[in-house]
Image (tube, rainbow, N blue to C red):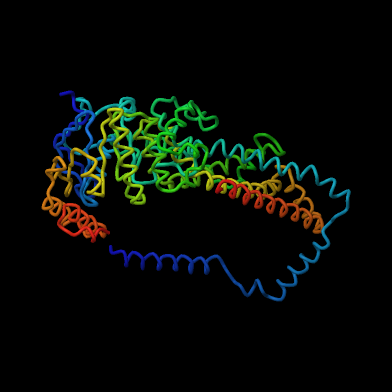
Amino acid sequence: MSDVRRTYLFWIALSGAVGLSLWKADVRMNDLFAPDARSQMAAMVRSMFPPELAPSFLRSMITPTAETLQISVMGMAVAIAIGFPLSLLATATITWSGILHERYSSSSRGVGFVPYAVARSFLSILRSIPEVVWGLMFVRAVGLGPFAGVLAIGVAYGGMLGKVYSEILEGVNLRPAETLQASGASRLAVVTYGMLPAALPALASYTLYRWECAIRASAILGFVGAGGLGQQIELSLRMFNFHEVATLLLILWGFVFAVETLSAMVRRSLAR
Amino acid sequence: MNTPIFELTGVGKVFAHRQTTLENVSLVVGAGEQIAFIGSNGAGKTTLFRVLNLTFRPTSGTLRFEGADVANCRRTDLRRLRRRIGMIYQQQNLVGWLRVVHNVLAGHLGRWSTAKALWSLVRPQEVESAVEALARVGLSDKLYARTDTLSGGQQQRVAVARLLVQDPDVILADEPVSSVDPSLAEGIVRLLVDASRTDGKTLLTNLHSVDLALRFFPRIVAIRQGRVFFDLAPEKVTAEMLGMLYAGASADDTAPLAYERALSVAGALPPSRHP
């Protein structure tokens, strides 16, 4: 098939998919902007103001806020511990294909393909299960509380980090790695000297973005009993106390903003 | 005569789904020789070097390193052989994000254990060797500079410093100066030739500049369409030969330039037409 026809086919397929989804997902913009819908939303937003700022309430939120932060930090630590080693195996250029493997026979490359395929499929299983489902499972295993949240984030995000890390590593220019291998460096030394340094800014930036997501996710996980701010949000929602909900959302926004700032700082210092 | 370093017999390299890049190359490289390889872009010089540095496996023919066939050597043997072969590419040899000291110390990676290699990124090991090598290439003040802050010519000298640290028996330089300012190119070629001469190392270089090849190397091997076109001492290379070497080359935009330069070096064109 010619390139032109393939391009046409791609655009036809894409617009077909979007059109079908628009229809089947029941997208009715009129409903969103109907007078009834507008007044309902306005009422809910109005009921959030002013946010609850009573000292006693704020004081009682210190522990769950700290808990959310701890869940996200520990969750990310677990996620990196799972995702990083797997990502090295899941990187084709490290395990079985490309210039670093040209010298080896196809049977010897096949030996590298096995851990690659296993790591890839394992990572995809980890991330195809939503973190809320992981959360429900871990709440059953280790009981209510932050530890279940840590495990849920660690496992689900381990799958995402591993996949994206391996894609970042596959995008690295292999020339330096090739030169190092040609001078007799071991595979692990080739990766740490020739590939990881070049990938580091992208790896760090993606990890920080995931940490931001983990803070939000730890709030969602609170809904299924994994502690932290999420549990408070759920409680306040159920009591129709939207003033408190507003305060809690503001705290989350503060976190997201802080991580964003930190991420910009780290990226700047790495790009130096 | 001693055992030759490289002995190629009918070496060919065909890529899967791609055209033949090397065909029936036979060549003997003696220990301590200095050879320049010339030819137009796409003639197969880089592929030949990747066969010689044990990155590519030839699809036909045999490659002997010091008399031993390397077709089926195991990974550990491969590492042992590779550490004796040093490589410099046109560019992008170095990891820009690392400091110069680590790029130079990477020359030790063939000997160091993986644990020592990793620890060296935290606390550089055997720094004196890097200091000494950088002094030889005239970059003593750049030890802790970040490599990507250096100019192209300085980076190429860092690559030479790494080579000195590696201390290989064979140096393979693939277009070491074509991304470098022409005024600095000669200095780098001289550095490589001197380093190989004083330490008795074998030096194989791919050069775009026929001029530098003829001036610095006692043996010229021309590659055309994946085959050895001629293999001569520089004084035996004629303008007709160079004309034929670069004529009918691909429609590559740099080919006419190289052709013109080749002719002007051989005296067929007035030197004023030097690009």
Locate residue B12: give its quadrant: top left
Looking at the image, can residue A124 be seen?
no
Q: Position of residue A209 (x, y in %)?
A: 60, 50
Nearer-the-camera pick, B33 or B174: B33
Q: Residue at x 64, y 42 (%)?
A: A135
Please identify the quarter of the rendering in which residue B129 is found: top left
Q: Residue at the spot x=28%, y=64% of the render?
A: A2
Q: As displayed, is residue B128 above or below residue B188? A: above
Residue lying at 61% horizontally and 72% vertically, measured from the top left: A29
Asked whether, in this view, residue A167 is left or right of residue A158, the answer is left
**Among the 4 quarters of the image, the one containing residue A11:** bottom left
Extreme residue toward the top, this view: B2
Horizontal and vertical percent position of residue B42: 23, 51
Q: Is residue A138 above or below residue B167?
A: below
> In this rendering, would B24 be left or right of B18?
left
- Image side of residue A144 versus residue B49, left or right: right
Residue nearest the observer in this picture, B39 or A250: B39
Q: Is residue B5 above or below residue B99?
A: above
- Residue B155, given in percent of the width and then of the height, sits at 42, 44
Q: Nearer the viewer, residue A142 or A245?
A: A245
In front of the other: B180 or A96: B180
Relative image position of residue A81 (x, y in whole percent): 56, 35
